[in-house]
Every structure is written in C-alpha cells, then in structure tokens.
Amino acid sequence: MNIDCQRLDPRLSLIQNADLNGKIVLVRFDHNVVKDGEIKDPYRIDRSLGTLYNIVERGGRPILMTHVGRPKDKKTGEIKCRPGESVGPIAGYLEHKLHIRFHIPQFNPDPKLGIPGIDTSINLAIRDLRERKIGGIYLPNTRWFQGEEAEGEIRDKFALQLAGLADIYINDAFGSWQPHASTYDITKYLPSYAGFLMQQEIINLNSVINPQRPFLSVVAGAKYDTKIKPLYAIYEKVDHLILGGVIYNTFLCAKYGVTIEGVLEKDIVLAKDLVEKDKEKKKIIELPLIVESDTMEGRMEGKYRTISIKDFKEGKKYGHILDICPESFNDPSVAESILNARTIFVNAVMGYTPHFSAGSAALDSTIDRNRIAIKMYGGGDTLQEFKNLCPGLYLSVLDNTQYYFFTGGGTVLTAIEEGSPYGLKPVQALMKTEG
C-alpha cells in the first residue's frame, strides 16, 4: 500500500516504524460487516488485508479483533452474545481468502453481562500462533466483553488483559471512532501504531476538511436530531449542500410550514435554525421534485406520486416522502452545483430502500458526469447503495484516483465536527505513544 507519509502528522506512530519480527501483534480492525450471521459486504475486510499481510510478511504473528453490531442494551446494560453477531463468518472469510487457519477462543459468557474477561485458556492458542501451527487468532466480538464499553476498574482490567496477549498494538479500525477499551485504553499499555488503512483514511479525510473549492456535500439520514452537530459543521465548510432522506423532509417542513408524515415536531423546531442560517448564506440546493407515498410497505401501484416543492403551501399535509425524483438532478441549479464542484463528499442514501432507490441512482450517475472533482463516499449504507444500484459504475471507479470510498461514514462526520482527523480519540492515542 503506497502511503504518502508526508501528508500525515509527524507525531502519528506508524506501522512502518514498528519492529514486528517475532512479535505477537494485536490488531484492532473495523470488520463490523456481519448481520444475522452473514457478511453483507466484505469491503471493510478487503481494505484491511494490506495491514494484515504486512504484519505477517515482516515476521509478526497476528491476533485480530473487531466489534460486531450492538450487543449491549443501553437501557438495561445487558450484553447478549448472539450467534448472529459472532466473528465466525469473518474468520471464515479470511481463511477462504488467505488460505490460512484462524482460531477463535471460546470463553464462558454470563447470560446477561457478556464475557467477564480473557482467561488463561487462550495461552495454548498463543503458543500455537508463535509456532506457526495456526495463521492467526481472532478474538470474539469485542462488545461481548464486559470491559469494552464499561467504565472504571472493569474496563481497565480488560485493557490490561488485551495488552497481556501481545507485544505490539496496531489500530487499523478507522470506522471505530468511539474511545473504547480496544481502540483507546489499550494504547496505555503497549507500543501502539496506526495501520495502513487508518493512515490512508486520515490522508483522504484531509481532502474533506481542507477541500478544493467549490465544495459540495450530500448528506441524508433517517434521523435529524442525531445529525445536527455534524450537519452544522459541514454547512460551515461547504459551498453547496444537498440534503436527502428524513433530514431533507425536516428541512422542508421547517422552511415551508408543511407537515410530512413521520417528521417529528421537535425536529422541525430544531431545523428552523438551519433555515434561518440559509436565508443569508444560501448554500442549500433544494431538490425540486420528490416522491410521496401513501404507505411505507413498498412501491405500490397508484399509491405513490411525484410532487413539486413549488406547490407547497403553509399548513398543507403530505404522506410519506420516500425518495427524490430523478428529474430533480436535471434541474439547472442542482446539476450546476454538482458538475462544477471540485470536491464532492457523499454521506447519503436519498430514498427509503429497497423500494425507493431511484433518487440515489440518479445522484450517483450525475456525480460521475463531473470529471474534475475528487469524489468521496462515506462508508456503510452509502457505499452499499452505490454498489447495489450502480454495480457497473462502482467496479469501473474502484481504482479511479478521483474516487475514494471511506470505510466509516460516521467517523468522517465526527472528524468534520472535530475539525481534524487528529481530533478523534483513538487517533490521538496513537500520537501519544512512542515506539
């Protein structure tokens, strides 16, 4: 993997400078790609293979870890070790891809509190790893462990247990920006370094935070209140902003005084600040044609229609707005903002998938017509939708230097909010440690 290290903060500890030969290397990846026991998209795994190969090629013996899903109930604090959130499919994928064997240690979980910790039963597997009887160890889902998201002594104990497994720690989990035991606390106890994917993501984040202009961003989401801070941070940075999903519906309600099914009154009140802000700065490019549906059950004949925001009148009520009409992207102001941009960042699924996806397909196709811009897509649903709707385009641009696909969309939004990729706590931790 070719990394331009001069574009990184010199205080960041890099895997390139670590002595890996003969060392047990604990690596935190973001392989959160399993749902109901199946890998939905191996992209995040594939992007991490460069770091894994480098560790082995330089004589290191890898222990891998990742979180999968959200096993912890935030209300009750219970941790459920559900089979559908196991790392088993990930280890199986790696075995198939790399032709080596991975061992997954088995620990006894508490039915309500998850796995208490790492016990000495793992020592035999570590010995087999050193003696090359196995290719790697893949720890169970980090969020199955009580200490991963806990506070105080339980968390410290888990971080120490993790550190006791290895000689060196590598963080290559760009998508895992929360400072948990396996992404943050661990760095207190082991020499710690940034992996190649982490480095590449940080470099490309700088293109979003310090963009070539005009800078256009496309942001959508299923909830308005959870996106307020990053949305405002993006608004201050961009020249033009396109909204989609519930975020756009909320903005329309606040601006035009209409009611749209599913949009909360409290969110409309919050969105009025953005409406007032945009009266002066006029950065938001409105998509004029939207799709109203009588039901969210599917795209049912006679139960959906295209409507124009030009027909909005205060007090009018609408059903579910579930997509952007593709014709919106032919509107001169919309097309011009996309085609004249020099930097485009997309963290958006425009419609209610899987039935209402024409808006997302039209967005991606219009963006591709811009041949001068750097085009960056946030991870997760945004990337999955791109691949599903435009598979030919996706394959054709994978190695195109004008495109970049982040592995974590939420991390990008958090970094924009912080104003720097080095504001992320797990990245800060890698800058404090010395090899």
Image (cartoon, grey):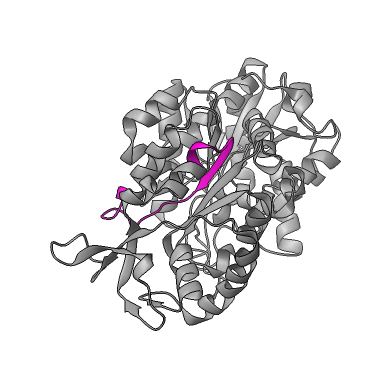
Give the left or right position of residue 163, taking residue 88 as reference: right
Q: Position of residue 71 (x, y in %)?
A: 50, 60
Magenta residues span 338-358
| Residue at x 31% of width, y 54% of height | 325
Residue 85 visible in the displayed image: yes
Q: Nearer the viewer, residue 315 or 9?
A: 315
Seen in the picture, residue 103 relative to 349 is either above or below; the reply is: above
Q: Position of residue 114 (x, y in %)?
A: 54, 61
Residue 235 highlighted magenta (yes or no): no
Q: Residue furthest bottom?
A: 315
Seen in the picture, residue 210 relative to 358 is either above or below; the reply is: above
Q: Nearer the viewer, residue 68 or 176?
A: 176
Q: Position of residue 229 (x, y in %)?
A: 65, 63
Q: Position of residue 393 (x, y in %)?
A: 37, 30
Residue 39 visible in the displayed image: no
Seen in the picture, residue 137 relative to 271 is either above or below; the reply is: above
| Residue at x 74% of width, y 22% of height | 16
Q: Quadrant of the N terminus?
A: top right
Q: Could you say which quadrant of the image residue 435 lies in?
A: top right
Give the left or right position of residue 435, taking residue 403 as reference: right
| Residue at x 49% of width, y 37% of height | 339
Question: How many tags in the picture?
Answer: 0
Q: Nearer the viewer, residue 322 or 282?
A: 282
| Residue at x 50% of width, y 46% of height | 32
Give the left or right position of residue 191, taking residue 274 as reference: right
Q: Residue furthest left?
A: 301
Q: Main secondary structure of the magenta part?
A: loop
Residue 343 highlighted magenta (yes or no): yes
